[in-house]
Image (tube, helix red, strand yellow):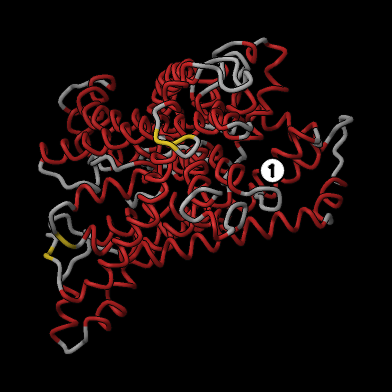
């Protein structure tokens, strides 16, 4: 079932679009590579993609490592709340983040006089907003499990705190930092909604250029070549992440009983940097979005929210925002159910460790195959749906939205379930089988409880991801049944104070919805951890957000 799902809803649409671009007359024509790769515009877009992804990754690491120390190695009142705040931006819809930063830097915003609107600086800041929590959580989870006795031994031998950190702690954290950096680069290089809203005319990425070549110019050959280029870039990032994960698994011996220590005087610089980052980078854009959604024409008002039941100024919409929100929620629920069914089946297979080398290789290939949707442009998937599934009539059906969203959510579900299933001792299954339990009962009694525990969290992540999906949905949503992210983008792009205000209010509604799902999942995780005496982040305990993508075994 999972392979059929992936073949029909991912490989077929992507291969069809690639075929139309690279073999328009039925014969393979690779001259498009020379044509596209020699164009100055292509190299400008590629340079912008690599520049903003690299800059955002470096800033995330520089800010995230001190944040990991404060939030995961130190104990103080309100730490759990700050951990939740740091993680929430990572699951916010990209179009909402773009709108929030646009409200911050555009005319009338607190930073409107600095001329940052439509600049690379604004885009990089938004990407750091997105991925700061990824680095903090990845490095912090590893840091919270490092045996402190090695540092204590170094200090006892006369090493200063800085030298002990540089020579003992940093080498131990290097694999986690490398893994977080690789995945941060991946998410920054494939940014779509943020760049589309903030980038203006002169700033773009490979992802947005694929959209321009496909939707505006109908240049499928250029889009296909750019998709191949993007896939190569993402493959390199994923390869780096996997190498870092393998290194951390092989070289580190971790403990699960390392207690957090009180704040020290030496932590003041890291604490100050973390406080400024959380307050200035994470909280400020969202706060500005909320404040501006409550103003229109220079006055405080709730009109932006009361107008959500209308169709906007000049008939900007064919439906109301609340109708679009209902469509988004319905599609997200169905997409989450599909993603859970497919992802659970894949996870049960991939979590096994067969003794046969051939079977082990097959399991690895299956795992890699279900990671591919993260490396292929969502625009490519969405447009591939249109040209591939149109003859079947599926594109005219409401089901096209949850199916497309499920394709994006399945990899996240798989990576969320795997840590819990891989933590099961295989001897438990063998003991149950030896006592007479059949395969079905072994699955129900041994794997079932772990799968159910992680499944609640995976469902929440699938819901949040589907609710905010914009790349493929922007192609597939029908005008009479758009989703909330599509409506939000349309409102922000229309002139008129009413449309702009409604767009800001819709952004707040979408942000609150995804944040509630995220914090609810975080609460469920901590509740399970307290009930079972486990610590959040340990093997067998579901981890937050797309952290499953960088979770170390």
Q: Is residue 300 above or below residue 271?
A: above
Badge 1 is on which residue?
Answer: 227
Residue 489 position within the rendered picture, expressed as x and y whole percent measured from the top left: 57, 32
Q: How many marks?
A: 1
Side (left or right) of 71 relative to 63: left
**Who is closer to the viewer here, 128 or 509?**
509
Is residue 362 in sight in this rendering? no
Residue 13's spot in the image, x, y percent?
67, 27
Q: Is residue 538 above or below residue 48?
A: above
- Determine crowd level at label 1: few under 14, some 14-19, many 20+ residues with C-alpha closer than 10 A: many
Residue in view at x 50 percent, y 20 percent: 402
Q: Name which residue lies at 41% across and 64% down.
A: 61
Q: Is residue 178 visible?
A: yes
* Image-based side of 141 in relation to 181, left or right: left
Question: Does dot 1 land on a helix, a strand or a loop?
Answer: helix
Work out which residue is located at the far bottom of the displayed protein and give it: 158
Q: Where residue 104 appears, x then y in whole percent?
A: 48, 49
The x and y percentages for residue 332 are: 44, 22
Q: Nearer the viewer, residue 163 or 66?
A: 66
Q: Determine which quarter of the picture holds residue 157.
A: bottom left
Q: Is residue 115 left or right of residue 18?
A: left
Compared to residue 54, the image places residue 167 above or below, namely: below
Which residue is at a point 73% across and 22% down the rendered structure image?
A: 387
437 or 148, nearer to the observer: 148
Q: Quadrant of residue 29?
A: top right
| Figure quadrant of residue 378 | top right
In the rendered view, tell whether residue 467 sits above or below residue 288: above
């Amino acid at each position: 079932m999972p392979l059929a799902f992936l073949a029909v809803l991912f490989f077929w649409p992507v291969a069809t679009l690639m075929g139309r671009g690279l073999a328009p007359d039925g014969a393979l024509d690779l001259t498009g590579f020379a044509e596209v790769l020699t164009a100055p515009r292509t190299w400008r877009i590629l340079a912008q993609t690599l520049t903003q992804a690299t800059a955002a990754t470096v800033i995330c690491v520089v800010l995230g490592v001190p944040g990991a120390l404060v939030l995961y190695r130190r104990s103080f009142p309100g730490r759990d709340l700050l951990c939740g705040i740091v993680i929430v931006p990572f699951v916010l819809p990209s179009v909402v983040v773009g709108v929030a930063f646009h409200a911050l830097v555009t005319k009338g915003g607190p930073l409107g006089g600095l001329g940052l609107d439509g600049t690379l600086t604004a885009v990089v800041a938004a990407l750091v907003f997105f991925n700061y929590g990824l680095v903090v959580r990845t490095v912090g989870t590893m840091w919270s499990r490092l045996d402190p006795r090695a540092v204590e031994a170094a200090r006892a031998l006369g090493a200063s705190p800085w030298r002990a950190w540089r020579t003992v702690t940093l080498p131990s954290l290097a694999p986690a930092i490398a893994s977080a950096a690789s995945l941060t680069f991946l998410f920054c290089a494939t940014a779509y909604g943020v760049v589309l809203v903030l980038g203006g005319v002169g700033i773009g990425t490979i992802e947005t250029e694929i959209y321009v070549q496909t939707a505006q110019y109908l240049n499928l050959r250029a889009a296909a070549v750019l998709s191949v280029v993007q896939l190569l870039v993402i493959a390199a990032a994923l390869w780096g992440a996997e190498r870092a994960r393998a290194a951390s698994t092989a070289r580190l011996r971790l403990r699960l009983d390392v207690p957090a220590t009180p704040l020290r005087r030496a932590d003041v610089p890291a604490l100050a940097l973390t406080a400024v980052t959380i307050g200035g980078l994470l909280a400020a854009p969202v706060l500005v979005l909320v404040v501006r959604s409550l103003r229109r024409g220079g006055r405080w008002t709730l009109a932006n929210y009361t107008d959500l039941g209308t169709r906007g100024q000049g008939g900007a919409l064919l439906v109301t925002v609340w109708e679009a929100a209902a469509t988004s929620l319905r599609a997200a629920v169905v997409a989450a159910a599909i993603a859970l069914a497919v992802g659970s089946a894949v996870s049960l297979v991939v979590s096994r460790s067969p003794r046969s080398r051939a079977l082990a290789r097959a399991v690895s290939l299956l795992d890699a195959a279900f990671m591919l949707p993260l490396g292929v442009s969502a625009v490519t998937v969405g447009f591939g749906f249109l040209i591939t599934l149109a003859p079947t009539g599926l594109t005219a059906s409401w089901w096209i939205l949850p199916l497309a969203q499920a394709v994006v959510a399945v990899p996240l579900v798989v990576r969320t379930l795997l840590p819990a299933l891989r933590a099961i001792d295989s001897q438990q299954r063998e003991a149950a089988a030896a006592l007479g339990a059949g395969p079905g009962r072994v699955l129900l009694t041994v794997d079932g409880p772990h799968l159910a525990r992680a499944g609640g969290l995976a469902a929440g992540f699938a819901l949040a991801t589907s609710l905010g999906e914009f790349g493929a949905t922007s192609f597939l949503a029908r005008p009479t049944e758009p989703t909330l992210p599509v409506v939000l983008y349309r409102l922000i792009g229309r002139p008129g104070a009413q449309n702009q205000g409604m767009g800001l209010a819709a952004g707040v509604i979408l942000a609150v919805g995804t944040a509630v799902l995220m914090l609810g999942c975080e609460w469920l995780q901590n509740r399970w951890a307290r009930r079972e005496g486990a610590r959040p982040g340990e093997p067998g305990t579901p981890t937050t957000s797309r952290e499953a993508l960088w979770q170390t075994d």
